Image (spheres, rainbow, N blue to C red):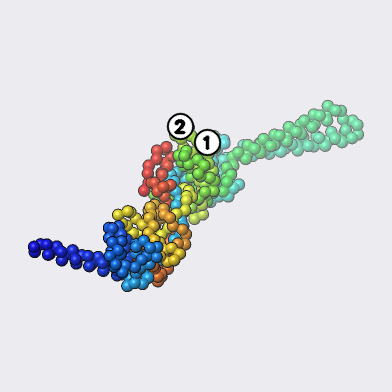
Amino acid sequence: MKWVKLITVCAALLALALSAWAVFLPSSHPILERAGLLEPMRAAGLPIPEDEDGNGGGRGGPPFGGGGGAVRVVAQEVALADADSRLSAIGTAEARRSVLLTSEVAGRLEEITIASGDWVEAGQMIAAIDAEAQELAVERAGVRLQDAEARMDRVTRLRESGTATDVQIQDAELELAQARLDLRDAEFELRRRQIIAPVEGWVGLVSLEPGNQITNGSELVRIDDRATLLIEFNVPERFVGLVSVDDPLEVSPLSRPDESAEGRIRAIDARVDQDNRTLRIQGEIDNDDDRLRPGMAFRITVILPGEQYPSIDPLAIQWDRRGSFVWALDGDDRAQRVGIEILRRHDDAVLVRADLEEGQRVVLEGVQNLRPGAGVDVAELVDPSVPGEGDQTLRLTEGGAPDDVAEDAPEETPEF
C-alpha cells in the first residue's frame, strides 16, 4: 500500500508540474504537443493560451527566460560573397625580352664597354672586335666610288655634246653601281665587328676581356629586360573555357612563399597537348622593383569566379540533432530556424548554403533564449561579415571540394 501511495503522489506532482509548465511557459507547447499531452490538458479545462496560429506550438508567447517579453539579441545582416575556385600550378619565370649576344665573325676582342650588371639601352655598343682590315676595305671602296662617280660625270658631259657612245655610258653606270655595292659590303663587314644591344635591359655576367680571341658564334653576354616576367604553366584540359586572357593571377616564389605578387594571363595556347591533356598558359607579372629574377620557380594561382553564397559570422551557427542551423529573423522580428550547410570557414566569416537572403538578419548573441516563433528585440545590429576582404585566403571549388593543383606535369594533387 505504501508503494501505491508513493506512486500516486509522484503522479500527482508530475501532473501538477506539467500543468504549470503548460500554463505559464508557452514555449513548452511544442514539446507537450509532440508528447500528446497538450490537447488533453486543454480538454481538462486548464487555462492554456492558444498560439497565434492556434496549434499550441508556443508562438506568440513569452520566450524561454524572457519573462514574457521579446528576447533582446545582437543580430547581423547576411552578406553575399563569391565562392571563388582556385587553380594552382608551378611555373618558371622568364624575362619579357631576353637576348643572348654572340659574335658573327671571328677575331680579337678589342673593346668591352659594359660591365656585369649594367643597364644598357637599345642601340648601345657592347663590344668591338679588331676591324683594322675592314676599315681599310671601307676606305678602298670609298676611293673606287669616287673614281666611278668622276668617270660618270665625264661620260655624262660627253653624252650631252654627242661624243659618247651608248657602250661608254652603260660601262660608266655599271662601274658606279658596282662601286656603291662594294662600299656597302665593306661597311657591312665593319659593322659586324661592333656588338650592338638590340634591346634595353640588364647585362648578365661578363666573362670576356679585351684581347680574348673569339670565334664565329662565341657567346658574349645576355641582356634581360626583366621589368615584366613571363611565366608558363600547364592546366588540365577541363579548365578550357574557364580561363581567359587578362584573368588575374596570384604568384609566389617557391623560395619565398611569404611573398606574393599580382599578374594576369597574357596568352593561352591554341590547342591542348594530346600527350598529357593539358593546356599551356602564359602569364605575366610586373617586376618594377626588380626583386624577382628570370629562372625563378613560382606557384601560380588562377582565381576563377564562382557562385555567390550567404556569408555569416561564425557566432551565428548553432547545432542540434538535425545538424547546423542559424536563427534568422522574419519581417515580424520573429525567430525562425534555418538549416545550413557549411561550405568554407574563415576567421571572421563562414560561407554557407542556406535559404537566406542578402540583408536578412541572423542572431549572434541571445540564441540560448530563442524558440521558433519567439519575438525578438534587436538591441544591436553589427556590420555584415564578408570573407576574404583584403586577402585571397578563402577559396573553394564547386560544391566545397578540395582545390585542384596543376603542375607542369599532368599529375594533379589536392591542395587543402
Q: Amino acid at mark 1?
A: Arg
Is 175 on the left-hand or right-hand side of 302? right
As shown in the figure, which amino acid type bears the numbered disc 2? Asp
Quarter of the image where the N terminus is located:
bottom left
The percent coordinates of residue 47 (x first, y second) are 31, 69
Q: Please give left or right for residue 408 compared with residue 43 in the image.
A: right
Residue 101 in the image, given as x and y percentages of width and height:
54, 41
Residue drawn at (83%, 29%) of the image:
168
Q: Position of residue 316 (x, y in %)?
A: 37, 61
| Tag 1 near tag 2, CB within 8 Å | no
* Residue at numbered disc 2: 275
Question: Which residue is the extreme one toward the right?
Answer: 161
Mark 2 residue crowding within 10 angstroms, few (<14) / some (14–19) / many (20+): few
Query: How many numbered callouts?
Result: 2
Q: Nearer the viewer, residue 221 or 38?
A: 38
Locate residue 328: give its quadrant. bottom left
Q: Tell me where residue 179 sits by quadrant.
A: top right
The answer to which of 33 and 276 lies nearer the viewer is: 33
- Most extreme residue toward the left is 1
Q: Which residue is mark 1?
A: 271
Judge left or right: residue 372 versus residue 165.
left
Of the numbered discs in the image, which one, if any, rests on residue 336?
none
Residue in front for this viewpoint, 325 or 14: 14
The residue carrying pointer 1 sits among few (fewer than 14), some (14 to 19) or many (20 or more) residues within 10 Å by Cα, namely few
Q: Residue at x 44, y 34 (%)?
A: 276
**Vertical position of residue 394 compared to residue 178: above or below:** below
What's the CA distance linking mark 1 and mark 2? 12 Å
Tell me the residue at 83%/27% (across/down): 167
Q: Secondary structure at mark 2?
A: loop
